[in-house]
Amino acid sequence: MDTVTTSGTAADRLNAICDAQPFVTRFMVRNLLTGETFARGAEEETPSASTRKTSIMMAALKAVEEGRLDLDEQITYEARFAEEVASGMFRYLTPGIVISLRDAITGMMVLSDNVCTKMVFERLTLEEVDGYCKSIGMSGTHHRFLIPPLALSPDHALGSVTTTTARDQTFLLQAILDAQTSADAAAKLGCSQALCAYALQTLKNQILRYAIPSRLPFGTVVAHKGGTGKRGRMNAGIVYRDGNPFYIICAFTDDVPQVMADGTPGYTMSLETIGKLSRACWDAFQL
């Protein structure tokens, strides 16, 4: 059982960063050196945005492990894949391009490309991915859509999107990390250690460097997946230091104003808040 700290220097600093903003920030942070965990609203349901894609990747890799999917399967980019898509670069490319399922997973994760997400998700079912999350212990995660509708309002209901918790995302990242050295941990995810190693490397290949990495020293390795939602921004990842896992941080902002009182876009401050939380962990946790 994790020890969840609610008071003390590190916790006070993390909570102060959140309290400085008018919007909601939920997070879970785990110091991988000590196992100590800091949390704020970590069990509360919150929009997942593209942080959901880590669990989609793992569900797909489980299907690969079972022989139901093949990472070398060739997929043709069709024009229909670009419909209702607002992220990534494939939507601007010419239909007819052929890529592998492996490359589609890469595009889904490292550029959050939703054309690639459709390619991956169409080889699964919504029920399969949702059931996978529940089966491994992510009881607070609910996959509701293949791709959420573009016309969502900023005040949409939670039931209009896929939702998760900071606790669930921390659990999943810890499980992937544990699987690097434990065959039993990999088996609990339904994958081989080789596939779990592929998953972790794919998270490390993330190109988008806002939020968690934004205030860390240049070149810091972060295995992470971010998200852009109508109600806020979010990011979940494993931060490395000197080649070793240092801490896990999963942070979700919600009810973020479109414009702050001083005219700054709300999303700017939500990303900045996650970056400050990450930097506070970097400074507070001792090697």
Image (tube, grey):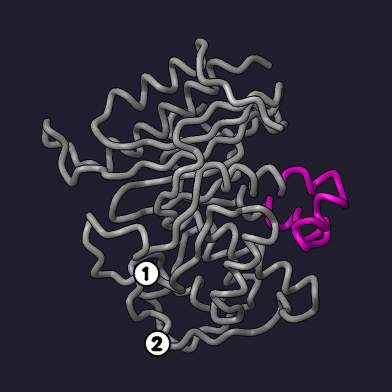
Circle 2: residue type:
Arg
Image coordinates for residue 95, horizontal then vertical, percent: 43, 86
Image coordinates for residue 222, horizontal then vertical, percent: 58, 40
Residue at position x 60%, y 35% from top? 248
Residue at position x 64%, y 33% from top? 240
Main SS category, magenta section:
helix
Judged from the image, the secondary structure of the residue bearing numbered disc 2 is helix
Q: Nearer the viewer, mark 2 or mark 1?
A: 1
Residue at position x 12%, y 32% from top? 261
Image coordinates for residue 38, horizontal then vertical, percent: 55, 26
185 inside magenta stretch = yes
Of 157 and 232, nearer the camera is 157
Report the span colored magenta: 176-201
In the image, farthest residue toward the right: 183
Label 1, residues with CA under 10 Å away: few <14, some 14-19, many ≥20: some
Q: Is 113 positioned to the left or the right of 245 in the image?
A: left
Q: Which residue is mark 2?
A: 80
Measure the alpha-carbon separation of dots 2 and 1: 15 Å
Label 2, residues with CA under 10 Å away: few <14, some 14-19, many ≥20: few
**Is 153 drawn above or below residue 37 in the view shown?**
below
Of 245 and 45, nearer the camera is 45
